[in-house]
Amino acid sequence: MIRDLVIGIDFGSSSTIAGVLVGDRIELVQENGDSVIPSVVYLPDKGSPEVGRRAVARQLTEPEKVIRSVKRVLGLPSDTDLVRRYAASVPFRIDRTGPRPVFKLRSGDVAPEQVAAYVLGRVRELAEARFGARITKVVMTMSAAAPPGYREAAVRAARIAHLEVVDLVAEPIAGALALDLHRESKQRRVVVCDFGGGTFDVSAVVQNGLSFTPVATFGDSILGGDDLDDALAESIAGVVVRSSGYDMHRDIVRWNELLLGSESVKRQLSSRAEVPFVMRGAYVQSGRAKDLQITLDRQWVEAVWAPLFERVRGVVGELLHRAGWTCDMVEVVGLIGGSSLVPMFRTAIGEIFDARRLLIAHDPELAVAQGATLLTARHRKQKSDSIPVLLDG
């Protein structure tokens, strides 16, 4: 049996990725061979919750029992605008009369921390089954733009999942370690851009040999891949309503199918100039169900996304202001997060900085989890001298 394991978890709005150090190797937790586990929970009327891809599949049949993107409201008071917007977007009721929101499902009331705990607990179970060890400690990452109550809520969620949080690290800082910058013992200014499923976080970091010192962090907690999906779905729905008069928001099942299709288009457009979009029975016209068949090209989609990427530029500008840096002072710009695969994002960051300074993670979706896993070395009984990572701040 492997002993003394500490798990590193990147708990994201869209997906959760985790890993452990086995010796000096990062081994990612997997479910059916996939290390990217959707942060989606299905709560049946009776029986145990389902987490991950099985829960995603339930979105098209029982959407009122599926909770996704819970990270966006974790730790937030009920009266915040973000909770109001979240409540308006989900197919179940949220009670906002108390200090914290409560999800009202047919299976019972559930708090955001409990939903997050289901995801964290599932990851812990998968890790214990794979590595044959009991795991009780975790290094977790958090958004650089996390609200004041998030830290405490994340710790509570971990505790419910039988995990003790021994470190809570800003996602861009963890991601910086996965960029292998520590392989070069240099003195330089680094900006790390983490474009994930739910947030866009940026950090200004000074590297001094093997030491990485955060100078400033900033972010937008409602700017990520999910928002690209939402914007694209809204635009496609606009095409439908203009041509047929049918509002696709009327049917929550159709709307969820449209969101999933929009996410697929986004991913395909990362490597293709245009993508056919087909949705059977997408809308109703003259009492008959009609199919939607259109071709979406990157130029049209990028026009839809343009306002979101103006916000990307604004976030970077604010970070530089807080750090007291200019663009020319930055020597390396690291891109991490699954949404950094979107070409428009790389173009936007390349226009702010010299594109030649961009350093793109080998697998950007995994970078934050890999960095969190590296940081678990600081909490093992047996330290390793072959992992040259030192984080200040």
Image (spheres, helix red, strand yellow):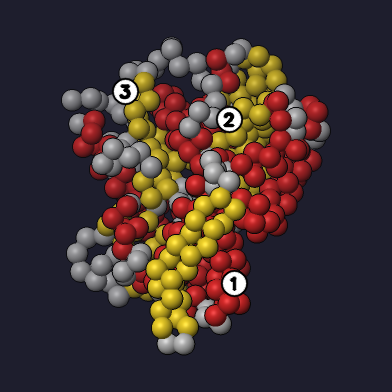
| Residue corresponding to mark 2 | 360
Q: Residue drawn 31% across and 70% down?
A: 62
Nearest-to-viewer mark from 1 and 3 = 1
Residue 190 drawn at (x, y percent): 67, 27
Q: Residue furthest bottom?
A: 286
Distance in Å between CA atoms under marks 2 and 1? 35 Å
Measured Cα–Cα span from mark 2 to mark 3: 26 Å
Q: Position of residue 305 (x, y in %)?
A: 65, 55
Residue type beneath disc 1: Gly
At x 51%, y 20%, the residue is 389
Q: Position of residue 125 (x, y in %)?
A: 25, 43
**Sequence-earlier tag: 2 or 1:** 1
Check disc 2 and give the amino acid type. Ile
- Against 84, residue 346 (above or below) is above
Specify the label residue 22 is tagged with.
3
Question: Residue shown at 55%/26% (left/top)?
Answer: 179
Other-residue count near label 1 (Cα within 10 Å), few / some / many at <14 / 14–19 / ≥20: some
